[in-house]
Amino acid sequence: MPKTITVLRILVASPSDLDEERKLLEGVIRELNLTWPQQLGISIELIKWETHVFPGAGTDPQDVINHQLPIDYDILLVMFWSRIGTPTPRSQSGTLEEFETAYQRWQRDPHLIRLMIYFKTAPISPDDIDPDQLRLVKEFRNSLGERGILCSTFTGGEEFSQLLRIHLSKQVQDFLKANEVAGTPAVAPAVITVAPESPMEKSIELPEDEGFLDLIETTVTAFQRATEVMKHVADAFEKLNAGTQQSTLDMESVGGDDNAKFAAYKRISNRQADNMADFVARMRPETPILDDSVSKALDAYGRIMILLPDFGSNADNYSQLESALSTAATLRTIMVTSKESTERFRSITAAMPRVTTQFNRSKRDLLSLLDLFLAIYDRGINLLGEINATGNGVLSSWKS
């Protein structure tokens, strides 16, 4: 028999420096639409000017876009990075104009629309920096708190895709819960009726057959591997710290005439350079392992979010999810501690004077490695926090 599908419409708004993320958003929604229509009776339609606007005339280009894009979408997803966008007669940019329109709808009735706002924090090439545009982005971001709007940040495409899976899953879970409680939709999405899939169509659509328990196993295994790597890093840090402290003590105890002191300082500095080089040599191979483990776990967890609504009545799945969330929370705690100690050590290392060529080279390599670890920690802490908040919300809904 035909199946009724509720369509949630997402309008994406962003300046031109986020074309890659717009494509990633399209891919994530395509992935979600492989399973959600059959599992949940929900499909997502992505609305963007590239696919929903045709050539026309108006008072200005944004006016043409405004008249052609639907105004009854359910979610506005906004992204910013280095640019605020092109000014219009009504706003500082077309993106801001679309945001203000949606915000006014939200002010009239918060149930009519949801706002999802993201800022990319990756470094910007000096050639692409426009100080005025950056200033406007910063001013807009600072204004959101006064409006009671919480935004999210990401550093790159992989993290953005993982955040989208988690956040969109949470939006759909909230929508389903609101419907279950109220009996009617909190928003007024479109409803369509579709014919059922044939077995052949379904097998062609779904390229992977990973199930809920497979993904849980992937997350736990990857989290455990990441925890092991971080223990190796902590042990190596302890050894490097001990060597640094000893070098400091040796420097303070140097005596003799100036020539003797100079020779001793150089010898101690080069010994410390050897300690730093040894740390880099030991930890550099661990960096891709940690990054890969965190990425696999976070990616699997994002996919778990897609499947969660199917498994609320199964006690075993509840236990598996609870265990995975506990592991994720533990890993996040370790990452927070590791980040804090890494930042402290980086600050100490960066302040060290440039005493010898060997020392300077080792110092540069060490700082570069520490920055890699900090980037991994930042991404992991951000996404693990989102995972725990969303996952624990699901556990609570399963109990009720």
Image (spheres, rainbow, N blue to C red):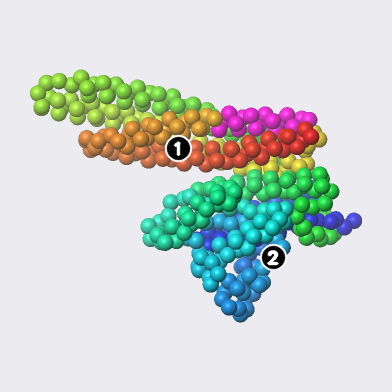
Instruction: Tell me if residue 85 comes above or below residue 332 in the rendering.
Output: below
Q: Does residue 48 appear to the left or right of 341 in the view shown?
A: right
Give the main secondary structure of the magenta stretch. helix
For this orientation, the residue located farthest to the right is 1
Snapshot quadrant of residue 195: bottom right
Q: Residue at x 62, y 49 (%)?
A: 164
What amino acid is at disc 1?
Phe
Disc ID at residue 266 = none
Residue 332, image x and y in percent? 55, 33
Number of disc labels:
2
**Where does label 1 land, which residue?**
373
Task: Say which element carries label 1.
Answer: helix
| Quarter of the picture holding the C terminus | top right
Instruction: Tell me if residue 106 comes above or below residue 339 in the rendering.
Output: below
Residue 28, image x and y in percent? 64, 53
Residue 328 inside the magenta-drawn segment:
yes
Q: Residue at x 84, y 48 (%)?
A: 183
Q: CA distance from mark 2 to mark 1?
A: 44 Å
Q: Nearer the viewer, mark 2 or mark 1?
A: 2
Q: Residue at x 76, y 42 (%)?
A: 309
What amino acid is at disc 2?
Ile
Question: Which of these two is toward me, 226 or 321?
Answer: 321
| Mark positioned earlier in the residue sequence (2 or 1) | 2
Do labels 2 and 1 touch, CB within 8 Å? Answer: no
Instruction: Tell me if residue 379 comes above or below residue 253 in the rendering.
Output: below
Q: Residue at x 42, y 55 (%)?
A: 124
- Would you say residue 283 is visible in this rendering? no
Q: Does residue 297 appear to the left or right of 393 in the view shown?
A: left
Looking at the rendering, the stretch of residues picked out in magenta corresponds to 315-332
Disc ID at residue 71 = 2
Residue 88, image x and y in percent? 53, 70
Instruction: Classify mark 2: residues with Cα within 10 Å, few (<14), some (14-19) or many (20+).
Output: few
